Amino acid sequence: NAGVTQTPKFQVLKTGQSMTLQCAQDMNHEYMSWYRQDPGMGLRLIHYSVGAGITDQGEVPNGYNVSRSTTEDFPLRLLSAAPSQTSVYFCASSSYQGYTEAFFGQGTRLTVV
Amino acid sequence: EDQVTQSPEALRLQEGESSSLNCSYTVSGLRGLFWYRQDPGKGPEFLFTLYSAGEEKEKERLKATLTKKESFLHITAPKPEDSATYLCAAPSFQGAQKLVFGQGTRLTINP
């Protein structure tokens, strides 16, 4: 019973590099989202998707891209990493946003140097 | 703007010393209030959902309650393994569909 799986768990990037954070869920949830968690800032929404083929921006979308080709997968792409993107990233899924609880992955700790 | 505020920021208790964590919210048309537990290096883990004022939910030493303006997480006779950061969140439909999180309360239970 995997739930929400994120990879990698840790990553160090150099400024300007790009990478993709992977997220997969096996609960057949329609809604998936990406949050970043920073000290003193709490969890902030980056991008979200209400179903395959549909994505939208959250509070802090700049510098990130997402796509949702399947119900299960929701990768987050960093286009050109910047030190300000150093953070812990969480992927979450829920059966219906706003009415049901979200299930979170274990997180990816990203450091941009 | 929808907001969720938690207090205190940190709380240190002795084992067996009961207390409460507060979550106040200003959310248009509340559609639920969620409590999560987060251990260091882990993702938030769902605890409770409360939907209407007066509702209560219990799980082991934890009990969550909801009023029209705030929610409380009561911890009765806590143990060291209850040490964690506790987050509350409410769904917001202002702009992006999202969960609005509080900053969390970092709870430490000393043996």
Image (cartoon, rainbow, N blue to C red):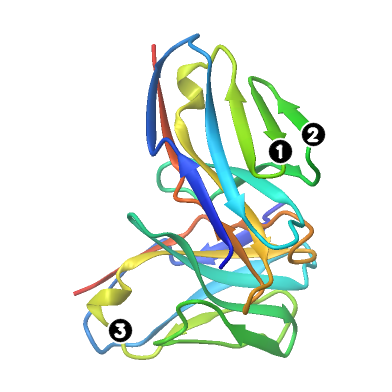
- Say which residue appears at 73% left-offset and 83% top-offset: A70
Q: Secondary structure at mark 3?
A: loop
Same chain for the residues at labels 1 and 2, yes or no? yes
**Residue A70: which numbered mark, if any?**
none
Tag 3: Cα neighbours inside 10 Å, few (<14), some, or many (≥20)? many
Q: Chain of mark 1?
A: B
- Determine which of the numbered discs, if any, sits on residue B54 in the image: 2
> Which residue in the protein does label 3 denote?
A81
Q: Is residue A112 left or right of residue A58?
A: left
Q: Residue A37 at x, y = what percent? A: 42, 61
Q: Residue at x 39, y 11 (%)?
A: B111
Q: CA distance from mark 1 to mark 2?
A: 6 Å
Q: Is residue A51 left or right of residue A77?
A: right
Residue drawn 57% across and 45% down?
Answer: B24
Label 1: element kind = loop
Q: Which amino acid type is shown beneath numbered disc 3?
A: Ala
Is mark 1 in CB contact (under 8 Å) with mark 2? yes
Residue receiving disc 1: B67
